[in-house]
Image (cartoon, rainbow, N blue to C red):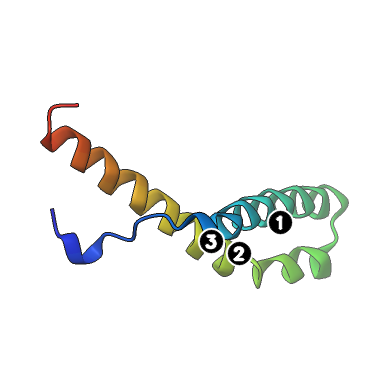
Amino acid sequence: MDRRRWRFPDPDRQHLVQAGSRLWVCVIAVARGAVAAGAVPQLAAQAGKLPEARKVLQVAIDNTDMLLELLSSVDL
């Protein structure tokens, strides 16, 4: 495992992951509604919010994968 990549979850920054999750869910919900209503401008407005949410969620996924790898290395 590449220890330089490890970004241990900081309890003080946990709110960022939660905020990223909420943002992602809200963007998806608004986008679904916009598609159903044919509201192209509203749908387009959501596109700019997705990269930020993806970045935060990707950090959480990466940390989960690394923790699973760490645990498997000690037979857990």
Callout 2 crowding tier (Cα within 10 Å): few <14, some 14–19, many ≥20: some
Under circle 3, the secondary element is helix
Question: Is residue 23 found left or right of 5 in the rendered image?
Answer: right
Q: Of callouts 1 and 3, which one flags the residue occurring earlier in the amino acid sequence?
A: 3
Q: Is residue 74 above or below residue 49?
A: above
Which amino acid, mark 2? Leu
Q: Tags 2 and 1 in contact by the CB under 8 Å rule?
A: yes
Q: CA distance from mark 1 to mark 3?
A: 21 Å
Residue shown at the point (61%, 51%) measured from the top left: 18
Mark 2, residue position: 50
Cβ atoms under marks 2 and 3 closer than 8 Å: no
Q: Earlier in the sequence, mark 2 or mark 3?
A: 3
Q: Nearer the viewer, residue 17 or 37?
A: 17
Q: Nearer the observer, disc 1 or disc 3? A: 3
Tag nearer the camera, 2 or 3: 3
- The dot on residue 70 is none
* Marks 2 and 1, how far apart at CA: 7 Å
Q: Amino acid at mark 3?
A: Arg
Q: Nearer the viewer, residue 43 or 16?
A: 16
Residue on which disc 1 sits: 27
Q: Secondary structure at mark 1?
A: helix
Left or right of residue 44: residue 69: left
In this image, 21 relative to 4: left or right? right
Alpha carbon separation for disc pair 2 and 3 = 19 Å
Q: On screen, 71 above or below 39? A: above
Q: Which residue is mark 3?
A: 13
Q: Secondary structure at mark 2?
A: helix
Answer above or below: position of 58 versus 64. below
In the rendered picture of this protein, how many numbered marks are placed on residues? 3
Residue 37's x, y, as percent?
88, 51
Depth check: give the residue in front, 74 or 17: 74
Residue 2 % position (x, y): 14, 59
